[in-house]
Amino acid sequence: MDGIRVQFLAFDGCPLAEAARKELDAAVSEAGLAGYEEIDILDPETPENLRGWGSPTILVNGADVTGNTKGEGVGCRIYATESRVPETALILEQIRKAQPS
């Protein structure tokens, strides 16, 4: 699955980051990807286009896996799932959709 860029956006102390990371790890593994980029959205070196997302956020080729857009500021992000984070199946679906034809 060359050409697919997966990014995990979070900040230290985010209570849902670890649960989201576990779902992402499972999806990346199942998709056969080598890994993903983890970005601290509070780091002053983080590019402007990656700031303003809630934590945690998962981007596939720059698009949020849930279809949401970037907000105006950093905060904790809670998803409308039982686990309150994006689930493996959703992440995997977005990775597969991003696969070049």
Image (tube, rainbow, N blue to C red):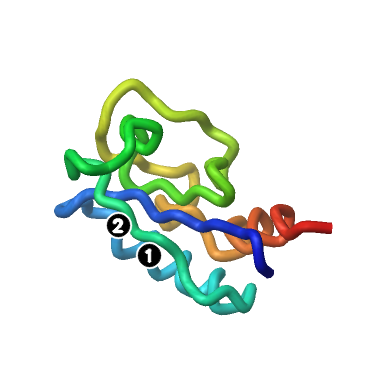
In the image, what residue occupies the spot 41% across and 46% down?
Answer: 57
Whether residue 12 sits left or right of residue 94 in the image: it is left
Residue on which disc 1 sits: 21
Residue 45 is drawn in which quadrant?
top left
Please state the horizontal and vertical placement of residue 26, each as a whole percent of the image.
Answer: 51, 74
Whether residue 90 sits left or right of residue 64 in the image: it is right
**Quadrant in which the N terminus is drawn:** bottom right
SS under mark 2? helix
The kind of residue on which mark 2 rests is: Ala
In the image, what residue occupies the spot 64% across and 73% down?
Answer: 31
Residue 15 is drawn in which quadrant?
bottom left
Please state the horizontal and vertical placement of residue 5, each as a whole percent of the image.
Answer: 55, 57
Say if 32 sits above or below 1 in the image. Answer: below
The kind of residue on which mark 1 rests is: Arg
User: Front-most of 12 and 18?
Assistant: 12
Residue on which disc 2 sits: 17
